[in-house]
Image (tube, rainbow, N blue to C red):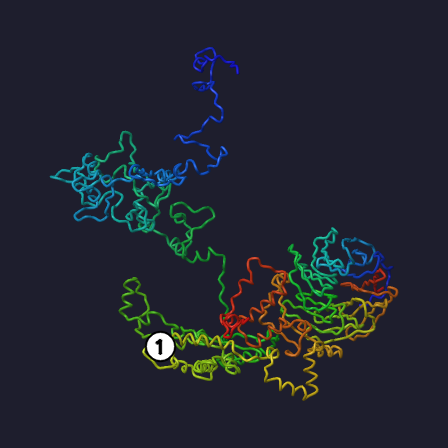
Amino acid sequence: MSRKRPLSTTAQQALSNSDSLFLGTPIADADQNSFTPVWKQEARDERGRKRFHGAFTGGFSAGYFNTVGSKEGWTPSTFKSSRTERAEKKTLRVEDFMDEEDFADQRADEKLVATAAFSAIPQSSSLKDSETGLQEVFRGAAPGTESVGYELLKKMGWKPGFGIGPLKSQVVAGRKVMLPPRADEASSFGVKLARKTNKHGLGYDSDVLSIQSSDQTESARGAWLAPGTISVKKNNGIGVGVVNEYEDGDDEEDPYEIKPIAYDRALGSKKQKPISGGSKHVFVSKTKAKARAAGTITTSKLRRCHDGRPPLAGFVLVVSGSLASSSMLTNEKEYASPSIPETYVPGILILRDPKTVLTPQLIADFERSRKSSSSAQSSSVYHQQRLSAAERSRILGSAQDHLQGKSVFDYMTPEQRERFAKVTGNQALPPAKSEVGPERNSGNRNEAALLELIPTLDKHQASTALSAGFMPYADDHEKRARYIAYLESQSGTGPVSHLLTFMKSSDSDTTAGKLKVEDWMRELKEFNKAAGLFRPLKGMLANRFTSSANTATTKTSVVEDDSTVLLQGASLSKGATDREDVSAAKLGMYGPLTRRVNAWAPSSLLCKRFGVRVPNMSAVEVSSGSEELKASARERLELLSHRTLLNIAKEADMSEEVTKRLESQNVDSGDGSKINVEVNEALEQKKAPRDLFLAVFGDSDEDDEKE
Amino acid sequence: MPFPVYSRNAPLKEHVGPVHVVTYNTTGQYILSGGQDRKIILWNPNSSKVVKSYIAHGYEVLDIAVSYDNSKFVSCGGDRTIYLWDVTSGSTVRRFSGHMSRVNTVDFNADASVVASGSYDAKVRLWDTKSSSQRPIQLLEEAKDSISSLQVVGSQIITGSVDGYVRVYDLRMGQVFEDLIGSPVTSVKDSTDGACVLVSTLDSTIRLMDKSNGTMLQSFKGHLNKEYRIRSCFGDNDVYVISGSEDGKVYAWDMLSGRMVHELKGHGEKVISCVAYHPKNPQMVSCGTDGSIQVWDYT
């Protein structure tokens, strides 16, 4: 390649040619015309390591170079050491474990801490004896040496024994002398060295006048200035220096002292004249006194706010708490409450059926019955309740009824009450009656507590469980006896205390057949659950099942009566269950026979659109013709229609969970449109009781699969 | 008030094919009619002039209901869809689909926020006009056969079904009252006082049923109704009971006595499928399978 430029021309030579102007710095290449091909140009970083390795050149060396470790790290090293050739000791460096980022982190974590000699705060926080707060600071760092702060102070002219602070004038030998403060004096620093246990800010001085004592601030108003300022002498005459402390002897005023913040000042308040408060005796005319008493201040002098300025236009000053303030500030008129006739007795008329018409006769009836008796009566049409809170609590069986109306002080001794009064400073405590609490006998308490813990069973449930043909625990007669005793106690046919006899009275009781307390409790709970399961089949469910004992009776009943045959045959056959209402309709006898009322739950959105309240479905009555035998066309098609299931569940007194679940299914099927995304009912329903699970999935005694 | 017996004007023959439904708007100024020709026509009964035509249905129009403020109406038909129309603009505001067969009957609720539709698939669907949901608010599935007629009155939905039952769904009570009539129900109409329901059935009888206990208060016979859906209505503030018939005559009975008072020939020998009475004046309109709509006045 021919070079057009002469070889001799370099940047310096070009610069020296003064007839042309060069801008910028020329490239100071030794050999400007050198040319290296790309593959020869190497990129290295500041440490000389190669950059752009591996992946950039298309090689397979990802994570090989410039990582922690070395080239040798990637190939397994075989350790070889012999007497003649000793293996090198592998000296590991920090760089083998930490990379750039780690180093950066380490540097970031470095902190500069003063060593003991230099630290201002002593390492151990306890005050050594015979040391004042100040001397603690300057305690020597190490025995024999002095702390650096100590030495610095000494250099500056401080002598041990003196305190820190501005010079104070003292009278020595009849003369006023400026002396440094003594070491044991309270530090005149703003910051106390005592441990801080309060929540004030640093430098807070509770001696500073606060907002509450506004009267005092008035007098001191002239002295206090805006917060944080340096006090300046008022006479701003020329030639008066700022630092004049020695002239008039007001040594207390340090011109550079930063006064603590006075929170009761406002900006621009210097010019205000203090309002005549209670300190001045001023002649107040009668009218003014009256006006002041009334609460409305009308005179010009009084029509000022506490900062001396008149209120804003259109506002009137009113003394708080006066008559005027309550009536003026609110536009409400006060009306007397209605007068209650003397013969009025409070009572609530609750109708059993909301459809009954409130005739005057009914109301008169109610009034009469109310006046005549005081206890809660019930009639077929209405029932009245006139229960007081005490009665209600008794009926509800709340445990607190024996504590009604009592306060803690009833149970306290007078000495305890005095102690309370002293501590709280409140003498107005109720008088102490040293009463004794209701439960004092511990022997009975245990029993009573245990009796309370017995799980209760609904009376009706208990009696049906008792009358069930099948009693559980066939193999354990004692347990069965205990079960029967439990059922009896719950149905009211047996005493509850009898159950306690099954339990060991104390740990040392070794009578056979008695249970320990925990076992006893557990067994009772088991009985509670079992009572729910082992019950006689009733109603619709009974129709579905026949026991071997019953077939004989059905045969005879079929043969007995033609009409019953017809009826029974009709009930079992498919097409004839509607006969009653169909025949009634045919005859034209429209009415209760042809009418069916069923519960139907409108969806909440529908109710909203129609502007009606969602009806309470549990209160809805359902009526149909003859319950058991009649089945609608739809039920014929289903093996066990949903409605039948519901009725079976209701009749058989199944647990609330089951009926609720059935009902909820019913409601949802009719309302296919609403899908609530956040709730998944299939997943969120409660699990069936464990007994049910066990009954279904539990281990069975016989072998399952013999094949 | 006298009964409108005179067919003063010539019948309106805008429709091609049977007219299935005719209804007044709430003031009685206009009539909406829908027929086999998939058209809905809005016209002035006094002048017999066509005001507007609404054409959107793919199949015949089986029922029309007007909202309380006369600004909207809803129509349904054989294409299984319910159309919500804006009267003035003549365009379809919304379409509700979901029924599985032809929709026989449709009605608004009091403030036109809910549209109830009953269909041949035995279901009543309740649609929400306020939201843009494609699904009905609720589905009423109690009926076993085609829903032939329904009416929304206050907080009740009255449905009549071919399975012979009239079902009154009461939202306030949370109950459904099912009254077995005996034969397939073709028309249900609530009385003005809300105490009874006028039920037309396929045994050529119209019954007045008491809503509270399901008893029959009155029955009206004399017309012919064996095969087709014939609609009946009250007239003149529940004084009269009016019905079409399959023999081409409009029948009117006195409600209290049950006595037939009028027999009006109007549509040849063809079936008169629907009658409607003016909300205030003594006027009524009837439509039939001959495709004509006849306005009846009292002079």
Where residue A456 appears, x then y in whole percent? 46, 76
Residue B116, located in which quarter of the rendered image?
Answer: bottom right
Residue A428, located in which quarter of the rendered image?
Answer: bottom left
The residue lying furthest to the right in this view is B268
Q: Name the residue under label 1.
A: A445
Q: A64 or A135: nearer the eye? A: A64
Q: Which amino acid does label 1 sit on?
A: Arg
Judged from the image, the secondary structure of the residue bearing numbered disc 1 is: helix
Residue A256, located in which quarter of the rendered image?
Answer: top left
Relative placement, left or right, of B239 versus A558 is right
Quick check: B28 above or below A268?
Answer: below
Relative placement, left or right, of B195 versus A512 is right
Q: B93 or A365: nearer the eye? A: B93
The residue lying furthest to the bottom in this view is A560
* Subunit bearing disc 1: A
Where residue B43 appears, x then y in whole percent? 80, 56
Q: A571 or B140: nearer the eye? A: A571
